[in-house]
Every structure is written in structure tokens, then in C-alpha cells.
Image: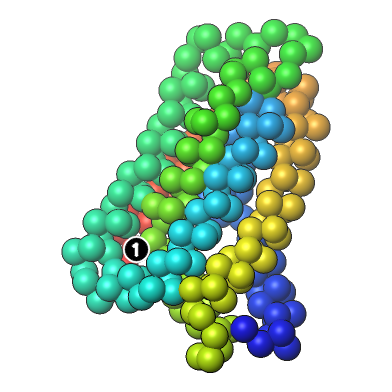
Amino acid sequence: MEISFLPAYLVAITLLTVTPGVDTMLIIRNTSRGGFRDGAVSSLGICSGLFVHAGISAVGISVILLHTAWAFTGLKLVGAFYLMWLGVSNWKGVLSTKQMQVKSGSLPEACGFKPVRSLREGFLSNVLNPKTAVFYMAFLPQFITPSGSALMQSLALAGCHFMIAMIWQCFLAMTVNQAGKWLQKPRVSRIMGGVTGTVMIAFGLKLAVDH
């Protein structure tokens, strides 16, 4: 990896990270559900998935996915289904009477913070997104030198992405958590839940139909 290329990579990856997408909606969703810790652990799961994509890109499995229609389609549909499932789960919470009864003055953690669940949701939402694999396959080779180990360079670049994404997503989770009392208002909570659920379902549908 040429050090001179690193600033360009950092700028590009930062712009990609702060652009609203599935990761953003998941952080907002989970922070609203379980507070800052829920959002931060979800971010850890999301960012950990980057190393999987970097490894896949390095060993060329992404090439197989790109040129094997059934494999790519299968991965795409699994990822789309998972996103839609998250969105539907959000709507179930919105429509549930129990979810609407939030104690006055309590934090979003009243809904229950489960570290394993948050980590799993973040990790799977990233790993099951084939667009991330395709992006890494197309993007990382521009910053990898043939003389070095493709795997180690890919993991190093993913490490930079990991740090930037963690900082941004934790900041986002902190911001959402600071608005906790406002978000706890039953009407606001239902609106937020409905909006994030609908957007995640839309992302899933878009992922399923895009070619």
C-alpha cells in the first residue's frame, strides 16, 4: 500500500461512511431502542463485517460472486431478506402496545439492551450486503501494490475504514441518545420506529430488485 495514496483513500472512505444508508438507519434504530450502548455495539458489529469483505476481496471470492450469477443473486436475496426482516421487526414494535408504554424519564434502555443481539444485527447487516463486497472488490485494488501481500494490505485498509466508521457511528448514536427524552414520547417513538422500519424495508426491496 502506497502511503501517498492513503489521504485519497481516507477522504473517499470518509465520504462513503457519512453518506446515509443502511448502516445509518440501523444505528438510529438500535440507539432509539436501547440507548447509546445499543448503537455503539451495533456499530462494532457493522465495522467488524468490513474485515470479512476485505478478506473476501483479497482472496478473489468477490470475483466469483460477480461472475457466478446464482451465487451473487443468492447472497443479494439473503441480505435483502434480512434488512426487510429488521424493518418488519421495527413495525411490530410500533404496533405493539407494550412498546408504546414507555416510562416517563426513563432511557431508551427500557426496551432492553442485549449486546449479543446488537452485535449480531450490525455484523449480519454488513456481511449480508453484497454491495459492500462489490465496492471493496472494485475500490481496494486501487490502493494495493502488487509487491505486497494483498490480504494484509486489504485488512489494513479495512482497519482505517473501521476506525472512521466507528467514530462516525458512535457520534451518531450519541446524538440520537441525547435526544432520548424527546424520542421517548409515544408519538415520536412510533413515528421514528415507523420511518426507520419503512426505510429498512425499502432498502431491502431495492437491494433485491437492483442488478
Assign the C terminus to one quadrant of the image: bottom left
Q: Residue at x 30, y 56 (%)?
A: 75
| Residue denoted by label 1 | 210
- Kindly identify the amino acid type of the residue bearing the numbered disc 1: Asp
- Secondary structure beneath dot 1 equals loop
> Quick check: 136 above or below 28?
below
Q: Residue at x 55, y 68 (%)?
A: 155
> Quick check: 179 above or below 73?
above
Residue 83 shows in this picture: yes
Where, by quadrant of the figure, is residue 87 drawn?
A: top left
Q: Residues within 10 Å of mark 1 (few under 14, many from 20)?
A: few
Q: Residue at x 60, y 9 (%)?
A: 101
> Quick check: 111 above or below 28?
above
Residue 135: x %, y % from top left: 47, 71
Where, by quadrant of the figure, is residue 39 drawn?
A: top right
Assign the N terminus to one quadrant of the image: bottom right
Closer to us: 23 or 188: 23
Closer to us: 159 or 174: 159
Where, by quadrant of the figure, is residue 85 drawn?
A: top left
Residue 188: x %, y % from top left: 66, 25
Q: Residue at x 27, y 73 (%)?
A: 64
Residue occupying the far left of the picture: 70
Residue 143: x %, y % from top left: 59, 83
- Report the number of numbered marks: 1
